[in-house]
Amino acid sequence: MKQQAQVFNNVLELVGKTPLIKLNRITADFKGDYYAKVEAFNPGHSTKDRIALHIIEEAERQGILKPGDTIIETTSGNTGFSIAMVSIIKGYECILAVSSKSSADKIDMLKALGAQVYVCPAHVSADDPRSYYQVAKRLHSEIKGSIYINQYFNQLNIDAHYNSTGPEIWEQTKGEITHLVACSGTGGTISGTAKFLKEQNPNIKVIGVDAYGSVLKKYHETREFDEKEIYPYRIEGLGKNLIPTATDFDVIDQFVKVTDEDSAHTAREICKTEGLFVGYTSGAAMQAIKQLEEEGTIEENAKVVVIFPDHGSRYMSKIYSDKWMEEQGFFDSKSAIHEDIQYIK
Ligand code: PMP
């Protein structure tokens, strides 16, 4: 547990050891007990602090990174934020290739932390030279003394969660967890956490959350990469248009797909029912639970852990803006935010 009165030497000492918080109201009518691993309690406000710190410290241990070197990464925003934070403390330059789909909030945050940001078009194929993968690769080849984190194809991404998220959940649930529900982007979170948990108890069910417009669910079921599954969607950080090697499909029992609209409303509902200000993919993960509940998949004695990857502040101009919701055709008066403010003069 984090000790409130403790003094830390720097912000990086606060990475990990996030709380597991019981969900009481949003799940009140569901079978089983539900607990959220709230990753916004990391100092960089997302689960990506874990991988940024682990991968950079591993590169230091191997002597690949020297002071003043440059760290390059492809990111929807969260990994970039964590890398920028670690770079400040450890004295590295930071260059981030970001998808144009990422919220303006996230891009501005990266700039505030001193990172150099390249915004790349979202709806081009992964091998297009303008894609954020290719831009990061090119910069890595051009810049001397640079490393490319490459979270989608880096085994250390899985290891970071195998070493931290998995053991924390096992300890926090006293080994009683029956189901893990987690979003899959790079797949590092779900793969590393599930690998550790299944080594402790192979009966734990692992449910991955995927987006409509992504290839992951179909690939899991058929081992076929089907380009026809790919189309634009709005949720950031969830699903993929390629098959990342940081996903271990064998430790995932099932994928559930969720829509942009349902996930946005469910994120708002988590805020209003549990007082947890969470990001878009937390809404997606909770939406997957709702769908599993509706199908009757979860039994009365289940102890379900859901990972909430990041904080709601990153989505102020998106899911927490009624204007944005209206523009997407998502507006629903039930989840409307009271945007009218009383100004006292
Ligand atoms: N949620 C958000 C907001 C993310 O940025 C990411 C990472 N892309 C994920 C979920 C998925 O995590 P992972 O990459 O470990 O699968």
Image (spheres, helix red, strand yellow):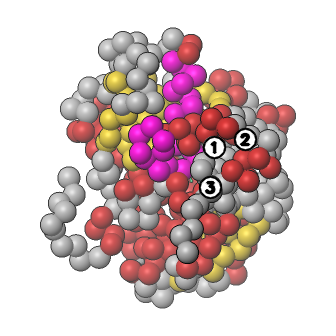
Circle count:
3
Residue named by callout 2? 331
Residue named by callout 1? 336
User: Is label 2 in a helix, a strand or a loop?
Assistant: loop
Quadrant including the C terminus: bottom right
In x, y percent, where is residue 314?
Answer: 57, 60
Task: Report the mark closest to the observer, 2 or 3.
Answer: 3
Q: Residue at x 53, y 38 (%)?
A: 269
Q: Residue at x 55, y 79 (%)?
A: 112
Q: Residue at x 32, y 40 (%)?
A: 21
User: Camera-side residue: 134 or 48?
Assistant: 48
User: Is label 1 in a helix, a strand or a loop?
Assistant: loop
Q: Name the kind of residue labelled 3 in the image.
A: Glu
The correct choice, above or below, for 22 with respect to 185 in the image is: above
User: Is label 3 in a helix, a strand or a loop?
Assistant: loop
The answer to whether any part of residue 147 appears in the image is no
* CB under 8 Å between discs 2 and 1: yes
In x, y percent, where is residue 246?
Answer: 55, 47
Residue named by callout 3? 339
Mark 1 surroundings within 10 Å by alpha-carbon count, few (fewer than 14), some (14 through 19), many (20 or more): some
Tell me how far mark 2 sits from mark 3, CA to CA: 14 Å
Left or right, 207 with respect to 263, comes to left
| Magenta residues, start to end | 271-293
In x, y percent, where is residue 306?
Answer: 43, 35
Mark 2 surroundings within 10 Å by alpha-carbon count, few (fewer than 14), some (14 through 19), many (20 or more): some
Tell me how far mark 1 sits from mark 3, CA to CA: 8 Å
Whether residue 274 is in magenta: the answer is yes
Left or right, 183 with respect to 171, comes to right
User: Camera-side residue: 64 or 216?
Assistant: 216
